[in-house]
Image (spheres, rainbow, N blue to C red):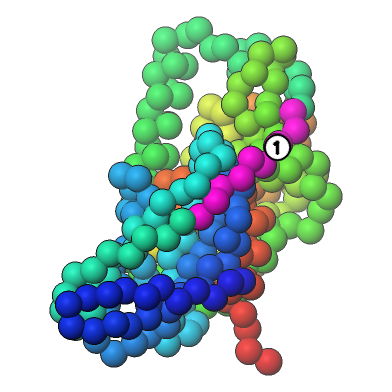
Amino acid sequence: MRKFLLFVLSAVTLFALEYHVANPNPVNGKSTLITFPKEAGLVYKDVALGKKRFQIFQAPLQRDRYYVIIPFSYYDKATKKRLKIHYSKENKAKIQILFIKLQNGKYAKESIKVSSSKVNPRSKAVKHRISKEYKEAMRIYNTVTPKSYLSRPFILPMHSTITSAFGKARIYNGSLKGYHSGTDFRAKVGTPIIAANDGRVILVKDRFYSGGTVILDHGEGIYTCYFHMSQFQVKKGELVKRGEILGLSGKSGRVTGPHLHFAARVDGVQVDPLQLIELLNNNLLKEKH
């Protein structure tokens, strides 16, 4: 973690905008977290990265701090990123510039053999289904629930061997088809899958690619996803607690065998779920002993 003091000169006074940056040198597909101290007369609004704005929220456990998560897409190029912090000081709108150097994650590649029907589907009905499911998911991911459900650290959705990490370029049946958008855990069919943290169940559905799917909304733009399930034990709209069983693992959707695919989104951006969890646990969700 690094501590910064940004000196802003106005017509009346000189003051320092204080903030902390966790993971100041991120790679594509991972996240950075910025925290700000509570200060009289100062109101934080959001941080702009290009055309996208990320809202600054009250920290869930520290009432004297605010935070914003800046997620970087897997497809973002390694370059210096220009962030604009929007805030007001004594009712005067201000902007402060912050630069973050995004680096190349240099992710590995992996080849996978699956049914050809799951690689290049030709049926119009299947293509329509895929498009409909994608649009439905993106509407969810791009919705920022104003409240947070988080009050304690994240946990893993199961204790098992990780068989494939986030970010690997995926070559299906000899054709490059994007990258691995989550973390795979080894799990035979019927293994319980638990909620990584408190949240609201926002989707329970069998989908073409991800198979049996549960998506949890943790509030303030943070989502976790659980794919390829064989059975559901929750319903859409339910509030669940950390550690509660969501369902059982399976081999539905586009898979080579039974496993759990665990993923995360922040403000619609797909990010490394384990890095996001570590970032939040170490900086926002530390339990007091």
Q: In this view, does 253 lie above or below 73?
A: above
| Residue plotted at (44% across, 16% down) | 127
Question: Which quadrant, please, contains the C terminus?
Answer: bottom right
**Kind of residue at disc 1:** Lys
**Residue 253 place in picture, x, y as percent:** 61, 29
User: Within the image, what quadrant is residue 112 found in?
Assistant: top right
Question: Magenta part mainly helix, strand or loop?
Answer: loop
Residue sticking out furthest to the top: 122
User: Within the image, what quadrant is residue 276 found in?
Assistant: bottom right
Between 41 and 261, which is closer to the camera in this rendering? Answer: 41
Magenta-span inclusion, residue 13: no
**Does residue 102 appear to the left or right of 268 in the view shown?**
right
Q: Is residue 246 visible from the viewing direction of this image?
A: no
**Residue 3 place in picture, x, y as percent:** 54, 75
Q: Is residue 120 visible from the viewing direction of this image?
A: yes
Where is mark 1, residue-wise?
106
**Does residue 81 appear to the left or right of 118 in the view shown?**
left
Report crowding for label 1: few under 14, some 14 to 19, many 20 or more residues within 10 A (C-alpha): few
- Point out the stretch of residues depicted in magenta: 100-109
| Residue plotted at (53% across, 27% down) | 208
**Residue 287 place in picture, x, y as percent:** 63, 83
Question: Which quadrant, please, contains the N terminus?
Answer: bottom right
| Residue plotted at (68% across, 26% down) | 170
